[in-house]
Structures are given as structure tokens and as C-alpha cells.
Amino acid sequence: MNEWIRTKERLPVEGDNVLLYVNDGRDKYITFGYIFSYDEEVFVFCTFGDEYIDESKVPYWMPLPESPEKKRYIIVSQGIKIAEFDNKEEAEAVVKKENEEFYKYQQECLDKGEPYADTEIFMYEEACGEIEESEDENA
């Protein structure tokens, strides 16, 4: 289970939606939004209320829990989908192997002073809309 994290100790990854514990001096509540910094200033945007909240009123945050939806792991190269996996570890292994080969090819081209095609591959997660069933639901 996730624990509340003090905003003064660590901020979440910029742009990630998180749970926010707000204490505005009058009310205390939990909402969600994201925290970001700009020009050494910290900003908190509350997604639910579509408003900015003073950072000093958000002493804690917590990552959102994982979605119960099944995920697919999509591998792309040059913006083109080249493979899809249900298993994250399999997808990561393919990315690692293919990129090791690409980096070797890239270095060979650089050593020879030749141009090379940028075929580095990337992986991203995509929710597929199906809810994962727990073992209890199948009984």
C-alpha cells in the first residue's frame, strides 16, 4: 500500500496525476491533480476543481493506485508499432536486445564515418479496456 509523501521531502514526477492532501486552514480534504515546478516555484493544479492550489496548502501527496485494467506493452520504432505484448518483462527484454543491436550498429557506422538509420525502439503502456479478474471473481 502506498504511503503519504511529504511535499517538502519529495515532489512527484512532473505531470503525473497524484492524490493530494489539502489543508487550507478551514477544510482538510483529499483530491487529485499534479504538482510541477517552474522557475524554482512549485505549483499545484487540482484536476477535479480545475484550479491551482497554493503549494503551502498541500503538505502531502500519494501516487495513484494502479488501474485494474489489463495493459498491453507496445513497442515502436520511428513512430511505427512493431510489436505488442501482454507481459511487461517480455516487452522490456525485446527492447533491451533490439536496442543493444542498434547501439552496436550505430557505433560501427560512427567509427566508419557513415550515416545510420535511427531505428532505436521504445515501449509504452496502453490500457486495453478489459478489467483484470481476481481469483475470487472466477470462483
Image (cartoon, rainbow, N blue to C red):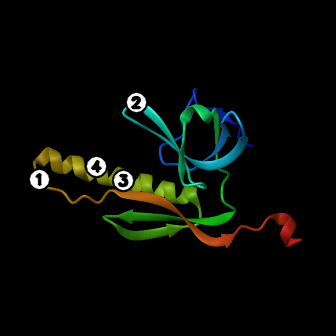
CA–CA distance in space, label 3 to label 1 = 19 Å
Q: Earlier in the sequence, mark 4 or mark 2?
A: 2
Image position, residue 4 (x, y; %)? 69, 36
In the image, residue 10 sits, relative to residue 86, either above or below, namely: above
Disc 2 versus disc 1: nearer the observer? 2
Image position, residue 78 (x, y; %)? 30, 64
Q: Earlier in the sequence, mark 3 or mark 1?
A: 3
In the image, residue 82 sits, relative to residue 105, either above or below, namely: below
Q: Which mark is residue 45?
A: none
Who's the residue at 40% across and 57% down the image? Answer: 122
Q: Nearer the viewer, residue 63 or 78?
A: 63
Residue type, label 4: Lys
Q: Are marks 2 and 3 in contact (CB under 8 Å)?
A: no
Disc 2 versus disc 3: nearer the observer? 2
The crowd level at tag 4 (other Cα within 10 Å; few <14, some 14-19, many 20+) is: few
CA–CA distance in space, label 2 to label 3 = 36 Å
Q: Earlier in the sequence, mark 4 or mark 3?
A: 3
Image position, residue 118 (x, y; %)? 25, 58
Residue type, label 3: Asn
Q: Which mark is residue 99?
A: 3
Who's the residue at 23% across and 51% down the image? Answer: 106
Q: Which residue is mark 1?
A: 114
Residue type, label 1: Glu
Q: Secondary structure at mark 2?
A: loop
